[in-house]
Amino acid sequence: MSRIAKKFIIIPNNVKIFIEKQNINIKGKNGSLKNTFNKKVKIFLKKNQLSFEPISKCKNGWAQAGTTRSIINSMIIGVTKGFSKKLILFGVGYKISIKNNKLNLALGFSHLIFYNLPKGIIGECLNPNEIILKGLDKQLLGQVAADIRSYRPPEPYKGKGIRYSDEKIKIKETKKK
């Protein structure tokens, strides 16, 4: 049984929540997010808190309720505070720049890589080797960061590539003769 689903979410004063059947719309100071949750979950809105329960006694009802609670909690945090991810380019000649919400990546290939940031994601270049991605949607932000990282993941011998700021790379020892 999920313990996460049994915890209720306290709704901040500046957040408005609208629930219609299986759709939820959350509006806050930074914007709004919409999502559709599982049919097996019932959401109760009482005063300034949300609680979750499975509709039927199905096998994974509490698991779905816990997942729904976690997603909706992330949506509330997104519309109030927002999320950010920092990527670092590590390697000689690796550079990143941003213009009109379009990333230009120089990653040691014979050509530049252009990546259009989706709507809702904003990029800031701190210097040519670091970028901060910001957005409301936690899932979309993580997917964009993973897509950018997939162009040149860190290699295990020198550690060159794109990495998250909090990521630790284990460097392997080279072969000895």
Image (cartoon, grey):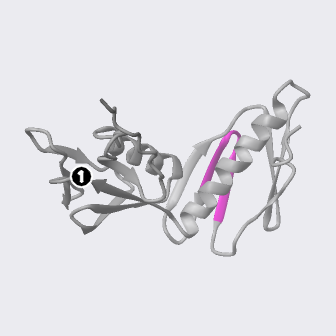
Q: Is residue 19 magenta?
A: yes
Q: Residue at x 88, y 29 (%)?
A: 56
On screen, 153 above or below 40? below
Q: Please give the residue where the numbered disc 1 appears in the rendered image.
A: 91
What percent of the width, then of the height, locates residue 64? 76, 35
Residue at (28%, 39%) from the top-left corner? 151
- Residue 18 falls inside the magenta stretch: yes
For residue 53, what is the image quadrant? Answer: top right
- Amino acid under disc 1: Gly
The N terminus lies in quadrant:
top right
Q: Could you say where residue 83 lies in the image, as x and y percent from the top left?
A: 50, 62
- Residue visible at 44% across and 48% down in the picture: 169
Q: Is residue 101 left or right of residue 144?
A: left
Q: Residues within 10 Å of mark 1 (few under 14, many from 20)?
A: some
Extreme-left residue of the structure: 110
Residue at the outermost bottom position: 13
Q: Residue furthest right?
A: 57
Relative to 154, 170 lies left or right = right
Q: Secondary structure at mark 1?
A: loop
Nearer the observer, 78 or 37: 78
User: For the view shown, which residue lies furthest in the top direction?
Assistant: 59
Main SS of the magenta part reads strand
Where does the magenta region start and end? 16-25
